[in-house]
Image: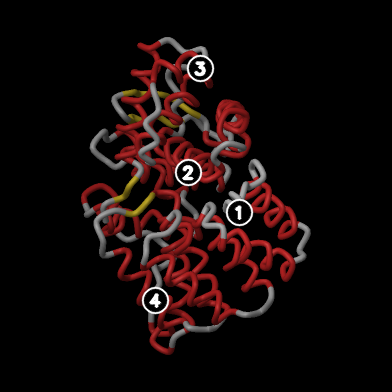
Amino acid sequence: MKNKKIVEFPNLKHRLLEKAMETMKEKKFQEALELFLQARENNYAYAEVELGMVVCYMELGQLTEAKNRCKKMLQEDIGDYFHVLQIYITILIQLKEYEEVKTTIEAILEEDKLPAQYAQSFYQLLEFARKMLPQGKEQVEFEPEYGEDERLHLQDASTQKQFEIIQSLKQRNIRPLIPEIQDYLKEELHHPVLKTFLVHILKEQGWDKEMEIVKLGQRVDFNPTSLKSGEEDPFLNKVITILEDKVESENPTLFESLKEMLVRIHTVLCPLSFDPDHPAAWAAGLHSVGGEMFGLGLNDEDLGDEYSVLPLELLQVKKAITKLEDFSYLRL
């Protein structure tokens, strides 16, 4: 008798992962965990499965297991490193392991690159961890008024010192420093992401007057209170909608990476507009650049046809994405 071949049902692994995700959203974490374990046995979407299991263990109160799995993901570079790192730090805080939080974040900040969208939260978590440790009580706070050193450092200090000063402004009245902020925004050499952080602070504090900014070779006037956040930006949402239609169901991991890349680019650009003003071109460009990063061997001509984008426009957007992605990392 001949050996029978085992035939898998089409898309069985994908459906298993989808079911696990849906069950987790319904807060049925034990059931979701069992489904993730099945998906793991089938060697499907390893990064998503591991992260799903971490979330389930967290919600089930098995924090030590969640911590160990998260740490393993970081050590083996599974999934989006900084997203996994944020979850790892959240677990450490729940376990009250503040020394480990402090050590972990300080080690990250000593490295060359830090994605702009994570910089602010990492510094805030580091500040929190330091305050929870005995020596945190001795930390020196800025005085309410601005000293001459602060005014000078905003312009002339290292990128890290500039970042620290800008972060300190969130809890202070920025109005006395408006002339220095305006000068900072007009100086082409300052990092575009630090300028974005200042723009956000101006918006948060309700500065309702025209400001001038020079960024990425462009000079524009803007009113901080009129700016839309990333979630409210119609252009950003159009690009995401196109990517949802073209990428999400086929490759959810790639889709999430493209969304994160788009947010980083938006952070660098703010308050500038996307150029060209063509959402499909940016969706196609992100798909192409992301495909290259993941080694998917995508063909730009095919992508151009799929997104109805001309080859020259696709090339233009890809060059812009590469440039903006490089700026999205703060070298502190």
Secondary structure found at label 4: helix
Secondary structure found at label 3: loop
**What is the CA distance from the residue labelled 1 to the residue labelled 4?**
64 Å
**What is the CA distance from the residue labelled 1 to the residue labelled 2?**
49 Å
Above or below, 116 relative to 222: below
Q: Is residue 135 left or right of residue 10?
A: left
Q: Mark 4 points at which residue?
A: 102
**What is the CA distance from the residue labelled 2 to the residue labelled 4?**
27 Å
CA neighbours of label 2 inside 10 A, class few (<14), some (14 to 19), many (20+): some
Q: Name the residue under label 1.
A: 1
**What is the CA distance from the residue labelled 4 to the residue labelled 3?**
43 Å
Please tell me the numbered disc located at residue 257: 2
**What is the CA distance from the residue labelled 2 to the residue labelled 3?**
20 Å
Tell me what residue is drawn at x 72 percent, y 53 percent: 19
Q: Residue furthest bottom?
A: 134
Q: Where is residue 128 in the image (x, y as percent from the top left)?
A: 48, 74
Please tell me the numbered disc located at residue 271: none
- In the rendered structure, which amino acid carries the disc numbered 1? Met
